Structures are given as structure tokens and as C-alpha cells.
Image: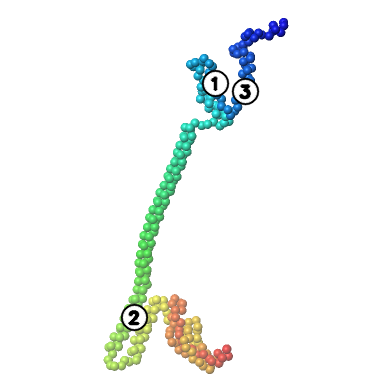
């Protein structure tokens, strides 16, 4: 029960734990400070006397290294090199496909434009042919219409020529140097009647009205004679040229000579 009996002797051996290390050695190893974060850890030295496979340090598996890198970087995981190359190839392939589709759309548009241009060219050609044909028909119709409209007039002029020729034949048959007045008047009247007949066939009629006073509806004064008598004012003295109507419309007015009273004009002024 004395202290001497309780204290172990210097030469006595210290008790050991199940791991083979004494409590004193364990406490000593706890006192050893760990190296800092920036310092490099030295690889574990094999115990002295250890040889062969026991002396080699154990290598860590590759999956453990990847797991440690992933845990150091958070939730991000480093993709393998082959995956990035495949993604780049996929993007390039998609771009090439889009360009190919665009080229096909452009090519189809160009084909449609070319077809539309050909249709327009054919339509223009047909229109030009139709215009040429229509122009020829109109020109033929115009020529035929003018000929059909002028043909009766030409026939009437030929009849007038026949009347003039008959009058000349009558003058040539007369013997002597002078012609009787009655014969000349008769020939000229015949010519006048033939001319009126030609005009009548064209719906042109002679104005037979000859009023004593000026009628501005179908008469036109071309000369005036001054007079002092108010009763003679606007009196028709002479018909210079006859007037004509065409289908009831005035074609040419009668040209007449009228008298004008000077006193009435002065009073009016």
C-alpha cells in the first residue's frame, strides 16, 4: 500500500494497448504538430527493416482522386476531354445542316423566280402577237371603212364628170363662134342640178330660204350698205354664197349683203 510499491520500477516494462502502442507513445504522437495548409506533406516513410511490398506506399484509386476534385470544386464536375470534343462536333454539324437547309430554300426560290420569269416572257410574247394581229385587223378595217365610205362619193363625182362632158359635147356641136345664152344657161343649170343631187345623196341640202331681213340663225353678213332710212335697216340686198344643212344641222351659213341704218347706230352709241 505504500507509494514505493505502487510506482513502477524504472526497469519495469510499461503496459501496452491492443494496438501494440503504449499510452506514453500515443500521448507523444499527439504532441507532434501537423504541418500547415501551405506546407507539403512528406510521404510516409516505411518503418525500418520493412522490405518488399510492405515498404511501398499504397496508391490511391483514380475514382478517389476524381471524387476529391469534385468535392473541392463544389457541385461542379469536370467533364472528360472526349465529351467537349463531341459537343463541338455536334454544334458544327448543326450549323452545317442549317446552312444546307438555307441553301436549299434559296435554290427553290431561285427556281420559282426563273419559272415566273419564263411565264411572264411567254405571256408578253402572246400579248405582242395579239397586239400585232389586232393592229393588222384595225388597219384593214380602217382601209376598208374609208374605201366603203368614199366609194359612193367617187361614183357621184364620176356622174358629175359625165354631166360636164355632155355640156361640152353640146357646145362643140354648135356651129358658129358665139353660143346662145339660153343654151349656156341650160347647160349650167343641168350641172347645178347634178351637183345638188350628189350632195343630197350625202344628206346635204341647199337652204332654199331667202328672207328679206337678216336671219342670224342661218345667214352671215359679209358686207353692209349704209342707209339713212330706218325701214331698210338689216334688209338683205344680195346672197353672195348659198348655205347648206347636213342632217338638219347648219353646215355653211348663207353669206349676204345687208343694209344698216347709220342714224340708229349713232343713237345707240
Task: Kindly identify which numbered label has been placed on residue 129.
Answer: none
The quadrant of the rendering that contains the N terminus is top right
Q: Residue at x 50, y 83 (%)?
A: 216
Residue 63 position (above or below residue 50): below
Distance from disc 1 to disc 3, alpha carbons, whole Å, reads 16 Å
Q: Which residue is mark 1?
A: 44
Q: Nearer the viewer, residue 198 or 20?
A: 20
Q: Which percent across, then down, holds residue 226?
A: 50, 92
Q: Nearer the viewer, residue 19 or 11?
A: 11
The spot of residue 200 in percent (x, y) is 40, 78
Measured in 3D between alpha carbons, the distance from the residue under mark 2 to the one under mark 1, in whole angstroms, is 151 Å
Dot 3 or dot 2, earlier in sequence: 3
- The answer to whether one can see residue 148 in this image is no
Residue 33 image label: 3
Mark 3: which secondary structure? loop
Residue 46 lies, with reference to residue 91, above or below; the image says: above
Q: Residue at x 58, y 30 (%)?
A: 74
What color scheme is it? rainbow
The residue pinned by badge 2 equals 160
Task: Report x, y in % for residue 207.
Answer: 44, 82
Q: Residues within 10 Å of mark 1 (few under 14, many from 20)?
A: few
Amino acid at each position: 500500500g505504500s507509494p514505493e510499491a505502487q510506482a513502477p520500477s524504472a526497469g519495469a516494462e510499461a503496459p501496452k494497448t491492443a494496438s501494440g502502442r503504449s499510452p506514453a507513445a500515443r500521448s507523444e504522437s499527439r504532441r507532434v504538430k501537423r504541418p500547415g495548409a501551405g506546407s507539403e506533406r512528406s510521404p510516409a516513410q516505411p518503418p525500418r527493416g520493412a522490405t518488399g511490398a510492405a515498404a511501398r506506399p499504397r496508391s490511391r484509386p483514380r475514382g478517389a482522386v476524381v471524387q476529391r476534385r469534385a468535392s473541392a470544386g463544389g457541385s461542379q464536375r469536370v467533364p472528360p476531354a472526349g465529351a467537349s470534343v463531341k459537343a463541338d462536333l455536334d454544334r458544327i454539324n448543326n450549323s452545317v445542316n442549317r446552312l444546307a437547309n438555307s441553301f436549299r430554300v434559296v435554290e427553290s426560290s431561285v427556281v420559282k423566280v426563273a419559272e415566273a420569269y419564263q411565264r411572264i416572257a411567254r405571256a408578253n410574247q402572246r400579248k405582242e402577237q395579239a397586239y400585232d394581229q389586232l393592229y393588222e385587223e384595225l388597219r384593214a378595217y380602217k382601209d376598208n371603212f374609208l374605201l366603203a365610205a368614199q366609194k359612193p362619193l367617187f361614183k357621184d363625182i364620176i356622174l358629175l364628170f359625165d354631166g360636164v362632158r355632155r355640156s361640152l359635147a353640146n357646145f362643140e356641136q354648135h356651129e358658129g363662134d358665139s353660143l346662145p345664152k339660153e343654151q349656156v344657161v341650160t347647160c349650167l343649170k343641168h350641172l347645178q342640178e347634178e351637183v345638188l343631187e350628189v350632195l343630197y345623196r350625202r344628206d346635204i341640202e341647199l337652204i332654199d330660204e331667202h328672207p328679206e331681213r337678216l336671219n342670224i340663225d342661218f345667214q352671215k353678213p359679209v358686207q353692209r350698205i349704209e342707209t339713212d332710212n330706218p325701214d331698210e335697216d338689216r334688209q338683205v340686198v344680195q346672197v353672195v354664197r348659198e348655205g347648206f344643212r347636213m342632217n338638219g344641222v347648219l353646215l355653211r351659213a348663207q353669206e349676204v349683203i345687208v343694209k344698216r341704218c347709220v342714224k340708229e347706230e349713232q343713237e345707240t352709241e
